[in-house]
Image: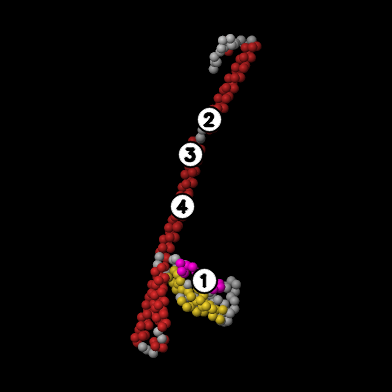
């Protein structure tokens, strides 16, 4: 690139005489300036190329982000599927819990009616009273059978060790012949639905007997499972 010269400056490079020391020095400086200029331009081009985004790297990065989003979405959908399946199972299993709990009161009244009938009156052959007792008993059995078909099962704790998850201790019975905290009397039957307590059994437990082995020791009597009074 030729530079404009002011009047009185040295002549152009092509007019220089290489044999002239002054011209030779001027040519050398001009060559150095040219090389420096070209080097600076080359460095600028390299920096510009490095600053430009590699299209392959950009596509790989975008692909990685999309893959990560897809995996997250798949995990969320799997969790949603499991939650939905669990909710459907719970709805099928426990949807009748409130109704079943109300029907237990009817079953209790049927049992009270049977207990109120004098045993000797039935044994003496009173046909009407005997037929009434049999009808009430059949009704009670049919109701319990219907509840069982819907997943409601009766707890039979008598003779078992006390379990605070299924039993509620109402009183203690002194008895030295059975292990401590053994259920000796059932005041009110308990029921479960699925793996939840619908109503704990109200029981009387033994006190004063030998302690059970540590591995089999029953829990101390305490409050009933909160699920017995709560939701299904």
The quadrant in which the N terminus is found is top right
Q: Nearer the viewer, mark 4 or mark 3?
A: 4
Could you tell which of marks 4 and 1 lies nearer the N-terminus?
A: 4
Q: Nearer the viewer, mark 1 or mark 2?
A: 1
CB under 8 Å between callouts 1 and 2?
A: no
Q: Identify the magenta region.
A: 218-230
Task: Tell me the SS state at disc 1.
Answer: loop
Q: Identify residue for label 2.
A: 48
Query: Overall secondary structure of the magenta stretch?
Result: loop
Tell me which corner region of the image, top left, top right, bottom left or bottom right, holds residue 176.
bottom right
How crowded pointer 4 is (Cα within 10 Å; few <14, some 14-19, many 20+) is rated as: few
Q: Nearer the viewer, mark 3 or mark 2?
A: 2
Q: Which mark is residue 223?
A: 1
Residue at the (48%, 75%) spot, across then down: 202
Could you tell which of marks 3 and 2 lies nearer the N-terminus?
A: 2
Could you tell which of marks 4 and 3 lies nearer the N-terminus?
A: 3
Q: Which mark is residue 76?
A: 4
Disc 4 to disc 3, C-alpha distance: 26 Å
> Residue 75 at x, y = what percent?
47, 52
> Residue 170 at x, y = what percent?
51, 76
How crowded pointer 3 is (Cα within 10 Å; few <14, some 14-19, many 20+) is rated as: few
Which coloring applies here? secondary structure
Task: Tell me the SS state at disc 4.
Answer: helix
Residue at the (37%, 80%) spot, across then down: 136
Could you tell which of marks 1 and 3 lies nearer the N-terminus?
A: 3
Farthest residue in the bottom direction? 124
Answer whether residue 220 is magenta in the image: yes
CB under 8 Å between callouts 1 and 3?
A: no
């Amino acid at each position: 690139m030729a530079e404009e010269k002011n009047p009185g400056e040295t002549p152009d490079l092509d007019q220089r005489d290489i044999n002239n020391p002054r011209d030779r020095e001027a040519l050398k400086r001009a060559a150095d300036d040219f090389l420096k200029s070209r080097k600076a331009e080359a460095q600028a081009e390299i920096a510009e190329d490095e600053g430009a985004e590699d299209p392959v790297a950009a596509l790989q990065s975008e692909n990685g982000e999309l893959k990560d989003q897809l995996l997250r979405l798949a995990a969320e959908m799997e969790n949603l599927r499991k939650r939905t399946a669990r909710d459907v199972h719970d709805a099928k299993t426990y949807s009748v819990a409130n109704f079943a709990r109300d029907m237990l009161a009817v079953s209790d009244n049927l049992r009270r009616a049977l207990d109120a009938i004098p045993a000797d009156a039935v044994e003496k052959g009173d046909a009407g009273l005997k037929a009434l007792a049999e009808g009430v008993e059949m009704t009670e059995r049919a109701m319990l059978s219907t509840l069982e078909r819907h997943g409601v099962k009766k707890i039979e704790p008598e003779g078992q060790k006390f379990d605070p998850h299924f039993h509620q201790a109402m009183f203690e019975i002194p008895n030295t012949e059975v292990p401590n905290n053994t259920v000796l009397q059932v005041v009110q039957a308990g029921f479960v639905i699925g793996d939840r307590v619908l109503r704990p059994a109200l029981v009387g437990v033994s006190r004063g007997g030998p302690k059970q082995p540590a591995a089999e020791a029953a829990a101390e009597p305490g409050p009933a499972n909160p699920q017995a009074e709560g939701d299904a």
